[in-house]
Amino acid sequence: MVRERIPVGVVGATGVVGQELVRRLARHPWFELVAVAASERSVGRTLGELGGWGEGELPAAIAALAVQPLASSLPASIVFSALDAALAARAEEELARAGGTVVSNASAWRMDPRVPLLIPEVNPEHLALLRRQEFGGGGIVTNPNCCVAGLTLVLKPLHDAFGVEEVMVTTFQAVSGAGYPGVPSLDILDNLIPHIAGEEEKIQSEPAKILGVLTADGVAPTPVRISAQAVRVPVRHGHTLSIALRLGRRVPLEEVRRVLAGWPGASPARGLPSAPARPLEVLEEPDVPQPLRHRDIGGGMTVTVGRLRPCPVWDVRLVAVVHNAVRGAAGAALLNAELLVREGLPQAAQPASRGLWVA
Ligand SMILES: NC(=O)c1ccc[n+]([C@@H]2O[C@H](COP(=O)([O-])OP(=O)(O)OC[C@H]3O[C@@H](n4cnc5c(N)ncnc54)[C@H](OP(=O)(O)O)[C@@H]3O)[C@@H](O)[C@H]2O)c1
């Protein structure tokens, strides 16, 4: 089936996540980037003048897009949001009320009972919440916190197979997770910082919603207890998670390895343009995964798992690496938008103006 490409916009297009979205949209088979917005600092300048793009990285038409001020509507069916949460709370609602479908990276709407908190391989059925929303003609879909994206992809197959009762997780988070310009270099070089404001609360609450059951009233959270310690470390991209699990029953370690390595993710996500061949990859060498070596596997969309071993206190220990700006943000948002289009949601199915895409 050949259709026109769908016009999309990005608000917050000049930040860490916005730039990753722009890079990925520049070569996207279904979406055409037609509008970008950011703060007054960037308004009026073109994307080509802003950002740290490599030579030839942006097609001329995208490099020539001029940054607009944040307004309540954009000439696009789908608006990707890479705004700070404080700004997103109001701006995303206004964009939705103006008829856009907002696909957000921000935390502002994630825990709202009307809003899907989505990982297509994990809970695609939660997209049904979008049909119940009453934000004028539009709607809001969110992707989780960057550590939660990695953690929940690991938890889902284990929870389905054995039940996951308790999780202890320490995160070693890259500086790009703090946005641009982020943490001052003199604070983080030769150092680590054992506190990231608001992060532990998100890691402790969001997985229960994502793993929850869709009901008539929203989502009934799954009863999993999570204790998180977040640490900022001098890594450029890629968050590392050290995880200990108490499972619902005793299982041989080989069974855990088999479940993680063989997990294909939920079928509605398979074959979407941003979906990796495998959502999880289990590595066997003793000193992996490492962010520098493994964050880009599957185009940054595969979560790598290693150090799988018995836990002398609970059941299982492991280490996971997730690319915070891709699987934890821009790639996650694109995958959500692709699922939305595949599911034929009315908000996404507005007529497009130019280009062609093949489904
Ligand atoms: N970084 C990550 O790894 C990551 C992962 C998951 C989720 N997130 C979430 O994604 C969102 C964006 O994060 P980020 O790291 O990309 O942040 P960032 O680098 O600080 O970028 C923020 C963006 O918002 C724009 N902005 C700021 N004030 C504005 C205003 N008053 N009006 C319009 N635009 C404004 C900025 O434009 P200017 O450039 O013009 O200032 C920039 O484009 C946040 O909600 C964050 O929590 C980030």
Image (cartoon, helix red, strand yellow):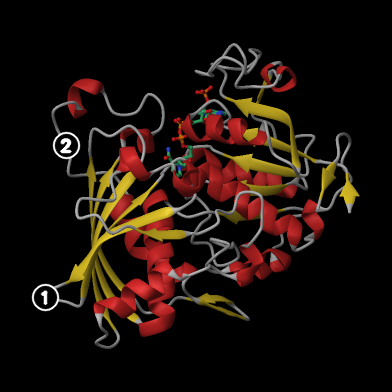
Q: What residue type is labelled 1?
A: Val
Q: In this view, does 291 lie above or below 280?
A: above
**Residue 106: x %, y % from top left:** 50, 46
Q: Is mark 1 on a helix, strand or loop?
A: loop
Label 2, residues with CA under 10 Å away: few <14, some 14-19, many ≥20: some
Residue found at x 26% / y 23%:
184
| Picture residue at 62% right of the left edge, 47% below the top | 334
The mark closer to the camera, 1 or 2, is: 1
Q: Which mark is residue 192?
A: 2
Q: In which quarter of the image is residue 181?
A: top left
Q: Quadrant of residue 155?
A: bottom left
State the residue in front, 114 or 271: 271
**Residue at mark 1: C-beta within 8 A of ligand 1:** no
- The number of numbered badges drawn on the structure is 2
**Residue 165 visible, this orientation:** no
Q: State whether residue 280 is above or below residue 128.
A: above
Q: Which of marks 1 and 2 is nearer the N terminus?
A: 2
- In the picture, which quadrant includes the N terminus? bottom right
Classify mark 2: helix, strand or loop: loop
Which residue type carries mark 2? Leu
Above or below 25: residue 107: below
View extreme (left): residue: 312
Res 78 visible: yes
In which quadrant of the rendered view does residue 5 lie?
Answer: top right
Q: Point out residue 303 in the picture as x, y percentages from the top left corner.
A: 41, 54
Q: Do the residues labelled 1 and 2 touch (CB within 8 Å)?
A: no
User: What label sits on residue 313 in the rendered view?
Assistant: 1
Q: In this view, does 72 lie to the left or right of 243?
A: right
Q: Which residue is drawn at 54% across and 19% down?
A: 53
Cα–Cα span, label 1 and label 2: 27 Å
